[in-house]
Image (spheres, rainbow, N blue to C red):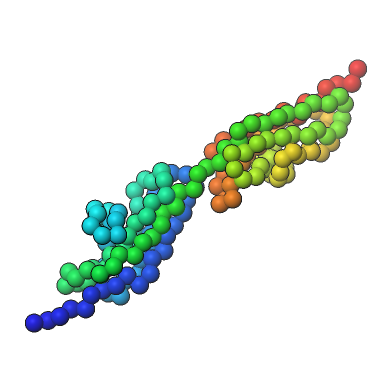
Amino acid sequence: ATINDLPTVTSTTGAERCGEGSVSLEALASSGTIDWYDASSGGALQGSGSPWSTGNLTTTTTYYAEAVSAEGCTSSVRVSALATINDLPTVTSTTGAERCGEGSVSLEAVASSGTIDWYDASSGGTLQETGSPWSTGSLTTTTTYYAEAISAEGCTSAVRVSALATINDLP
């Protein structure tokens, strides 16, 4: 009779993303291939191979890698890999400002998490400054700026929110 060695999962590599979607997980086996499960034992087979792309995820999910030898032997222990879904921050409010005549104004924005970046366009554009409140440079005309939230994980808000810097004419 032949006694086959059990394969082992020697390492796993998780992945993360901003907002919902799929991530690519990796695992290395001492021999054979990798199967991915939704539980450390039992559970349902989710996919095979390495790297392996999860389906669409909306929350952080743990998957478990199992090594499978050419003879069909499986590892005695499954090893976890974390598919992290970081929440997208939002700009919850902005406060514009006004003044009479040329000069700077102070704009404010509040983020659900993280910090605020200020841009000169609702998408793309040029970064003007980071932080809130922000004192604009000297303005001669009314100008709209846009606040974007940046989380600690580096995720950006899906939508920038405008704040108006109003310059009223002197009489």
Q: Residue 81 appears at what percent x and percent y?
A: 38, 60
Query: Is 136 left, or right, of 65 in this rendering?
Result: right
Res 105 quadrant in image: top right
Q: Residue at x 83, y 22 (%)?
A: 168
Q: Residue at x 32, y 70 (%)?
A: 9
In the rendered image, the residue lying farthest to the front is 41
Q: Residue at x 30, y 59 (%)?
A: 40
In the rendered image, the residue lying farthest to the bottom is 1
Query: Is 57 left, or right, of 160 in this rendering?
Result: left
In the rendered image, the residue lying farthest to the left is 1
Q: Is residue 54 above or below residue 72?
A: above
Residue 99 seen in the figure? yes
Q: Nearer the viewer, residue 161 or 77?
A: 77
Q: Residue at x 47, y 51 (%)?
A: 17
Query: Is 163 left, or right, of 123 in this rendering?
Result: right
Res 143 quadrant in image: top right
Residue 24 seen in the figure? no
Res 144 quadrant in image: top right
The C terminus is located in which quarter? top right
Q: Nearer the viewer, residue 91 or 145?
A: 91
The N terminus is located in which quarter? bottom left
Q: Residue 64 appears at what percent x and percent y?
A: 32, 60
Q: Residue 56 appears at what percent x and percent y?
A: 37, 45
